[in-house]
Amino acid sequence: MFQGRKPSMRCNRSMTRQASGACLSGSDMMIRRLPISETAPNPGRRHLLAFRIALVLTLLVCSAVGRAELADMPDIMKFPSGLPEIGAKSWILADFNTGWVLGGENIDQRMEPASLTKLMTSYLVFEALKTGRLKEDDPVFVSHAAWKAVGSRMYIEVNTQVSVIDLLKGLIIQSGNDAALALAEHLGGTEKGFAERMNRKAAELGMRNTRFQNSSGLPEPDHYSTLRDMTLLAISLIRDFPEYYKLYSELEYTYNGITQQNRNVLLTRDSAVDGIKTGYTRNAGYCLIGTANRDGFRLVAGVMGSRSRAVRANEVHSLMRFGYSVYEGVIAFKSNSRIASVPLWLGREREAPVGVSRNLGIPYPKGTRDKLSVALELPEGLEAPLPQGQEVGHIRIKFDGKKVYGAPLHVLHDHAEGPWYRKIMDRIIRFAVELFD
């Protein structure tokens, strides 16, 4: 594919480029263009377009780009002190958008995940609903094994049929082991068959230290995970299934005349908290992964191996409060909105708008907003036909001049070939550009 540039109005190889900040939930982002650094003439070369970002008061942070991954926050952005004392065996504070770990201890230690396991069970059910394999009102047969499940239950009756959505609510709100097993048998044939699916999905999501043996989290040999992996799963679930994730914010659920409260007490303690899951076994201790969304800036905090229900809630909440006290969230660009336009050869349009497939944003220490900048790496030109979603460049977010985060840039819509006379004219112009370049 030809990568040369469409000539400017002066018909030489010097080009102008368009860049626009996205208007995000009523907030404007003003961008000032800096000079383009030139390299030796080459039709296929790429240039870095550097932009300083001048941000208005209202800033948002949205979902991560691509598959979620957890990595340490760059050292130059870390807040040096003030983290609360946490007594849990393992704890973590992470940014939802970047997957940056803002703080943590023993996050790669293998432990029993207890009912945090149900995050994966719900993930697979959400996936089946989204792809159409399941419908919310599909009936699910309750086996004897599901009916007699021990531990927390939603109290389904043996040899009855319960809808998928009712079982999901029982799984998520009531942490029902019976609901987990009924859904597992329905999707996987057997619970072991479902566990195999859980493990395959864990591998796909990058959960490198996780092994599931059942759908509920009841103790079983070789059933383990880490807080890093469970946080990664929670982020993936929120990101991939926003339409179903809202179930995690429901405070109570009544089934078969029995009303049970959501075990995540942070839902009633902090209006910014909207999920996600608790867990407990004797060996695992008290576990909780929670998340809060304040003005679009979402943090995820979790503990495993805490000593009581009250303590696990206090520890997670204190991590969230710390995060919001020292960090702000900044939006860079909104998904599927034009960030820049690349000159287009042989097409009906003269330019191809490009952007990110997911909303892009990062956290940064309060008071350091002026240290943020953005650079776009793009080809000098593209050639039609061009499919929507094709990766054509990269966006890099810098802090104090150092790259801290990046994401691919994609073509925002299909570009068909132009009429014959335009293609002939483009080829003539392109030949002239290459001749004198």
Image: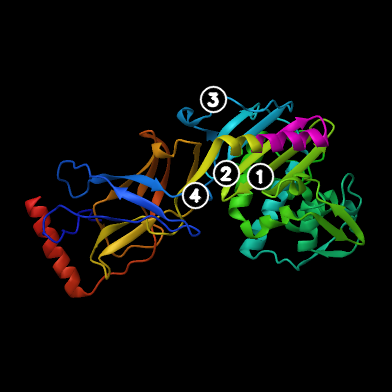
Q: CA distance from mark 4 to mark 1?
A: 19 Å
Q: Nearer the viewer, mark 4 or mark 2?
A: 4
Q: Secondary structure at mark 4?
A: loop
Dividing the picture into quarters, in which one does residue 156 lie? bottom right
Q: Which residue is mark 4?
A: 59
Q: Residue at x 44, y 39 (%)?
A: 369
Q: CA distance from mark 4 to mark 3?
A: 24 Å
Q: Secondary structure at mark 1?
A: strand
Nearest to N terminus: mark 4 or mark 1? 4
Q: Which mark is residue 96?
A: 2
The answer to which of 407 and 21 lies nearer the viewer is 21
Q: Which mark is residue 399?
A: none
Nearest to N terminus: mark 1 or mark 2? 2
Q: Which residues are magenta?
A: 303-320
- Which residue extends farthest left? 436
Nearest to N terminus: mark 4 or mark 3? 4
Is the Cβ of the residue at disc 1 closer than 8 Å to that at disc 2?
Answer: yes
Mark 1: which amino acid? Thr
Q: Which residue is mark 3?
A: 80
The answer to which of 375 and 283 lies nearer the viewer is 375
Percent coordinates x, y for residue 183 in the rendering: 77, 56
Dividing the picture into quarters, in which one does residue 247 lie? bottom right
